[in-house]
Image (cartoon, rainbow, N blue to C red):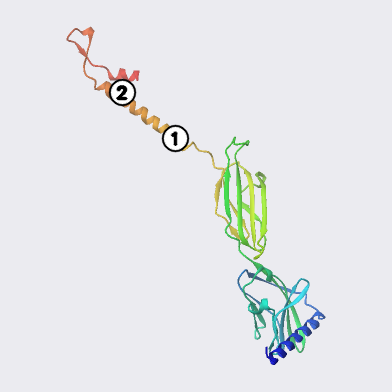
Amino acid sequence: MSLQLRCLYTHSLALVVTLLLFTATSGDGDAVENITAVLGHSVTFRCPSNHSTPVEGLYIQRFKNDKEVFINGFYRGQPLPVLPEYQNRTKVNEMELSMEMRNISVSDEGLYKCLVFINNKPEISKILLKVTAEYSVPTITKDCNKPGDGGAGKSCQLSCSAVGGYPQSTVRWTGLNQSLTNVIYNRSSADNESKTWTINQTIVHNCNQPTNISCAVGGSVSHTITICETESFPFVVIVAIAVVLVFVLLLVFVVVMKCCFRGPQRDDGAGETGVRFIDCRSQLQHV
């Protein structure tokens, strides 16, 4: 580092320390502006100023671990030193008195302070940044038993899960009678790196009628499924009965045709030359 750059950096650092000491003793405004950023996207902090007087400097810091940490800014046309974690993610617009922050993470969430310097006096405002991340479409599953399978009546075990969301949320069920529902498993866990949440819940619902249900986590909603369906006659049994009926009808048809087209038979009561035909109707009565 050249001597000139080293002097410039030392001067800027001294200026930041001076501003910190100055603003620490200055009164803060009570009003807080709320802004929201989507995880991984960008957000712009806009610092208000109601004066037409040229602005000498802009100074943005955040409250972190009970301390005020400088983020980015300028003073009298000179940029101020920026921490490494913000060097490639923040950019100050001197004309608009704003700062863009890119690649938002959960750790960026918090309270920020905006200082606009006019005539060596700061106008202070506060901005509360909230970070959000949409949960995945919830996965919903069912496992229904039959009456008599270890219980007095039919019931369904239902599970709902979603991942990758922020802030922490809960499972909401639609279409269920809550008086017939019991929660048997409920767990939320945050990823150590991204700080996003995974939400899981399993419930048992006692059936009283067929119901269409879905579950939601955050703003994401699952597809709809049907539970507690009325038990219909088993398809295999229906097929078996149909096969038996067809077999019986074919057997009857064969017997009738055999009787009707049987050749002439001798009638002992009619003499040696007498013959008679079998009456198909009487045979049908025997069948």
Could you say which is closer to the camera, residue 80 or residue 237? 80
Find numbered disc 1 in the image and state the secondary structure of the residue it sits on.
helix
Decide if residue 206 is on the left or right side of residue 10: left
**Mark pair 2, 1: CA separation:** 26 Å
Name the residue beneath numbered marker 2: 255
Quadrant housing residue 263: top left
Quadrant housing residue 169: bottom right
Give residue 10's position: percent from left, percent from top: 74, 87
Q: Is the residue marked by circle 1 packed among few (<14), some (14-19), or many (20+) residues within 10 Å? A: few
Spot the residue most to the right: 25
Q: At 58% from the left edge and 45% from the top edge, which residue is drawn? A: 143
The quadrant the C terminus occupies is top left
Please state which amino acid type lies under the numbered disc 2.
Val
Vertical position of residue 144 compared to residue 216: above or below: above
Q: Can the viewer see residue 212?
A: no
Please state which amino acid type lies under the numbered disc 1.
Ile
Find numbered disc 2 in the image and state the secondary structure of the residue it sits on.
helix
Q: Can the viewer see residue 236?
A: yes
Q: At 75% from the left edge and 82% from the top edge, which residue is drawn? A: 123
Spot the residue most to the bottom: 4
Count of marks placed on residues? 2
Vertical position of residue 238 compared to residue 195: above or below: above
Vertical position of residue 76 compared to residue 33: above or below: below
Give residue 125's position: percent from left, percent from top: 74, 78
Name the residue beneath numbered marker 1: 238
Q: At 68% from the left edge and 91% from the top edge, which residue is drawn? A: 2
Q: Is the residue marked by circle 2 packed among few (<14), some (14-19), or many (20+) residues within 10 Å? A: some
Could you say which is closer to the camera, residue 1 or residue 78? 1
